Image (spheres, grey):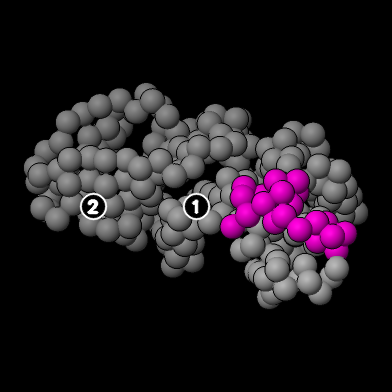
Amino acid sequence: MLSTHRLLDHGGLALADVTCRLPTGRGHTDEADHHAVVFVRRGCFVRSAEGTSNLLDSTQAYCVNPGQQQRYDHPQACGDDCTSVRLHPAVLASLWGEDPTLPSDPVPSSPRIDLEHRLLLAAAHPGDETADALHERTLWLVAATLEQVDPARVASGRPSTIRTRRALVDAAREALAADPDRSLADLAATLNVSAYHLSRVFHAGVGHTIARHRMRLRVRAALERLAGGQQQLAQVATDVGFVDQSHLCRAIRSETGHTPSSLRRALS
């Protein structure tokens, strides 16, 4: 039995938890219809594609390209679990250049990458992080994985000077101050850079991700409303762009160490 639990489909990235409990033996051949980077979490299996077979276990990731004839064979009866990231061609091009073909050989899943992909999966399951935050984390995970194959290729879209990078960060901050709801993909398109490089340069410039910056802007907007006497937390959450009151409360407590109720009393 093969099951796929989709956890994110946002900004050209689709994150999924894939569970395989097929019996041992030779699998069926099919044709891939998407680009993907797949991280093995548990178990092992043999993937055959383009005339080559590779044994894959939890120390490796592998890539899928559209049109590939592939077969998955299972030497063990315990099954396996994987984390799959499908990439829209435009997102892949922003990370990997004009040639959309991902590496055919397995890619090492370093301890840092393995832990990050497990933490990403854990963050996605309860729904504690917004789609924008998960999108940015997923983009970083894929980029870090591909950097192991060709660092220069993944880094090719990075602005070349300190002044240019600072101007890019300032332009992104200005756009977010005007509209915190703007997504990473939208910001990147407006600023004419790739989403990954904008995210990386922004993080280097301000010390946190665009998703964290967006959340901090929303928290500060919420605190301003609380200081102005707004009593209904659910209404404040809606006004400043949080999913619901619970999301607002978690974000404020994470940022300030205090509950919204205590801050409402203190500020007003």
Left or right? Give the position of 164 relative to 96.
right
Give the quadrant of the N terminus.
top left
**Three-letter amino acid code of the residue under disc 2:** Asp
Is residue 142 depicted above or below 249 in this figure? Answer: above
What x and y, as percent, mark residue 30?
25, 27
Q: Which residue is mark 1?
A: 127
Left or right? Give the position of 80 relative to 141.
left
Left or right? Give the position of 83 relative to 72.
right
Nearest-to-viewer mark from 1 and 2? 1
Q: Nearer the viewer, residue 221 or 152?
A: 221
Under circle 2, the secondary element is strand
- Of the numbered discs in the image, which one, if any, rests on residue 108? none
Q: Residue at x 69, y 42 (%)?
A: 184
Disc 1 from disc 2: Cα separation: 24 Å
What x and y, as percent, mark residue 110?
44, 63
**Three-letter amino acid code of the residue under disc 1:** Gly
How many other residues sit within 10 Å of disc 2, few (<14), some (14-19) or many (≥20)? many
Read off the magenta span.
224-246
Q: Which residue is mark 2?
A: 80
